[in-house]
Image (spheres, grey):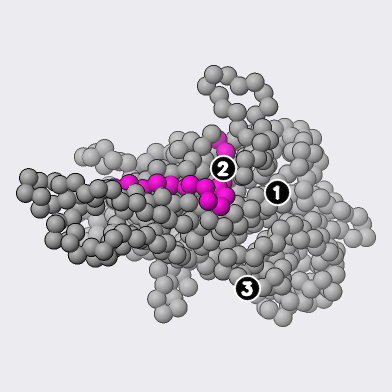
């Protein structure tokens, strides 16, 4: 699938954007856009405000953010009454189908008062500086805030997207498969159509992107900074605004929809995770024959969620996918059947504790993050996972062999999570894949945290006679443990245990 996004690199002078620094000697403030979700409106708002303080604290005050784990201090420091948050404005606030709330807001944080508050609490101040340094750090904060907000949105929409489709089934006339008419096949067609939950998901995505997007003036500012801007076009309910205003050639497409500008490739990658799961979301149904439950064997024909270089969102009642296959039955089975029915499976995959739930038992389990961290050497992969802070958690690790096996079995093979070569090709990368010479099939290889040891029973014994001295284990998604030199880049996906 071609990339749905167009990235534009633009150049110029030192001016600053979106997180505008309203800095003066008396009081230095920054604006930051943040998101939060909770059981109530107030919970969602407080979580978003806490995120604003955490990001500002870590950027301008101290890298030792552990102090914010103290709930009393965290509540005091995020209180509007404390003066650390001068004001805030709600940009997007919506109630999810499950009754919880999501909010995106713009908060103005006083760095001067946050510094004084921290000093009064006995917190060592590591980071101070002049206006120039403040401006640089606020821009980084702006970019980090965007990534966090996009990841928050992807997680928030994962479960409602699974309940965003209604299904209709039609069966055709049975056809005999043999001269004795003992075996028959019955043509079945299931049509998936968007329901009102899809309207919510589409609207929430658009409103969040609108809240985060750079304005035209801010894009010009990024041009002056010689920084990359990543554009994404979203089409919903027939938005007629034309993105490509220039004359188009014979093989070019005129793209319509709303145009948004984002700051980081990571934000685009996260959006690609969402759109790559479209097939998974639409096929969450069960067919019952009155005798048993059926498995859909058709790959399906899907609405082009990324057709024409834009994200094409659906609204209520629009067709999302069609699945057609032959149900093979004996005459005896047909005599016992009462007719076909179809129903949604509901929420099958959970997103909580920072990512996709790989498995859970007795309140404990494994979570996988919702995005690859890149294509890295082993030591860099380990460091990237340990330094990851996303969706409210910072205890991520590089998975061991058993953990990545579970990710493959429960997430990758189910068709979601943004894992795999199809996903990587969508991003137009040129990273090599691991291939099976016997079949020619390309597989995806991810680092594990484990080092190579000769005599490992899970590894081909031929490796015991190899010259590998400084190697680690990687997992290939055809369920093969491989030995790789540490300086060879491989894919990276973080996990956390809860």
How far from the left and from the top, in percent, is residue 223?
Answer: 74, 34
Read off the magenta span: 309-325
The correct choice, above or below, for 168 with respect to 421 in the image is below
Q: Nearer the viewer, residue 409 or 375?
A: 409
Residue at disc 1, secondary structure: helix
Chain-order first, disc 2 or disc 1: 1
Find residue 26 and report its image quarter. bottom right
How far from the left and from the top, in percent, is residue 447?
Answer: 40, 53
Residue 404 relative to residue 10: left or right: left
Chain-order first, disc 1 or disc 3: 3
Residue 394 relative to residue 301: left or right: right
Q: Nearer the viewer, residue 213 or 165?
A: 165
Q: Which residue is mark 3?
A: 39
Q: Which mark is residue 311?
A: 2
Label 2, residues with CA under 10 Å away: few <14, some 14-19, many ≥20 = many
Task: Name which residue lies at 65% across and 50% down.
Answer: 206
Task: Name which residue lies at 56% across and 69% down.
Answer: 98
Label 3, residues with CA under 10 Å away: few <14, some 14-19, many ≥20 = some
Q: Nearer the viewer, residue 208 or 368?
A: 208
Can residue 180 be seen by looking at this rendering? yes
Magenta stretch encompasses residue 482 = no
Q: Which residue is mark 1?
A: 210
Find residue 14 and report its image quarter. top right
Label 1, residues with CA under 10 Å away: few <14, some 14-19, many ≥20 = some
Give the Cα distance between marks 2 and 1: 14 Å
Residue at disc 2, secondary structure: strand
């Amino acid at each position: 699938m071609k990339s749905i996004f167009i990235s534009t690199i633009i150049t110029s002078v030192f001016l600053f954007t979106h997180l505008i620094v309203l800095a003066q000697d008396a009081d230095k403030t920054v604006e930051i856009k943040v998101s939060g979700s909770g059981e109530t409106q107030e919970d969602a708002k407080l979580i978003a405000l806490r995120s604003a303080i955490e990001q500002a604290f870590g950027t301008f005050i101290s890298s030792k953010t552990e102090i914010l784990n103290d709930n009393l201090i965290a509540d005091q420091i995020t209180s509007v009454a404390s003066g650390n948050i001068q004001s805030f404005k709600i940009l997007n606030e919506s109630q999810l189908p499950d009754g919880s709330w999501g909010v995106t807001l713009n908060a103005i944080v006083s760095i001067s008062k946050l510094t004084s508050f921290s000093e009064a609490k006995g917190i060592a101040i590591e980071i101070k500086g002049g206006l120039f340094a403040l401006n640089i750090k606020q821009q980084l904060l702006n970019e980090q805030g965007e990534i966090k907000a996009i990841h928050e949105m992807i997680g928030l929409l994962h479960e409602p997207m699974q309940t965003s489709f209604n299904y209709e089934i039609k069966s055709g006339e049975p056809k005999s498969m043999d001269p004795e008419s003992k075996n028959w096949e019955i043509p079945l067609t299931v049509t998936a159509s968007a329901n009102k939950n899809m309207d919510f998901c589409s609207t929430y995505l658009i409103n969040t992107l609108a809240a985060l997007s750079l304005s035209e003036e801010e894009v010009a500012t990024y041009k002056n900074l010689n920084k990359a801007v990543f554009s994404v076009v979203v089409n919903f309910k027939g938005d007629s605004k034309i993105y490509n205003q220039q004359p188009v050639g014979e093989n070019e497409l005129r793209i319509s929809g709303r145009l948004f500008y984002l700051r980081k490739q990571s934000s685009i990658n996260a959006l690609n995770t969402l759109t790559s799961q479209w097939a998974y979301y639409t096929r969450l149904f069960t067919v019952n024959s009155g005798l048993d439950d059926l498995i859909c064997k058709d790959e399906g024909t899907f609405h082009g969620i990324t057709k024409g270089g834009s994200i094409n969102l659906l609204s209520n009642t629009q067709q999302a996918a069609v699945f057609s296959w032959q149900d093979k039955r004996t005459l005896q089975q047909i005599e016992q059947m009462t007719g076909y029915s179809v129903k949604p499976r509901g929420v099958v995959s959970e997103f909580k504790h920072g990512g996709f739930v790989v498995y859970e038992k007795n309140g404990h389990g494994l979570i996988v993050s919702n995005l690859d961290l890149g294509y890295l050497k082993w030591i860099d992969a380990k460091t990237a996972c340990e330094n990851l802070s996303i969706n409210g958690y910072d205890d991520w690790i590089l998975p061991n062999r058993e953990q990545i096996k579970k990710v493959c079995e429960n997430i990758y093979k189910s068709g979601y999570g943004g894992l795999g070569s199809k996903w990587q090709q969508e991003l137009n990368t040129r990273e090599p894949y691991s291939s099976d010479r016997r079949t020619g099939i390309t597989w995806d290889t991810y680092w594990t945290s484990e080092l190579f040891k000769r005599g490992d029973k899970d590894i081909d014994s031929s490796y015991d006679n190899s010259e590998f001295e400084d190697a680690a284990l990687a997992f290939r998604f055809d369920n093969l443990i491989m030995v790789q030199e540490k300086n060879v880049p491989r894919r990276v996906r973080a996990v956390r245990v809860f």
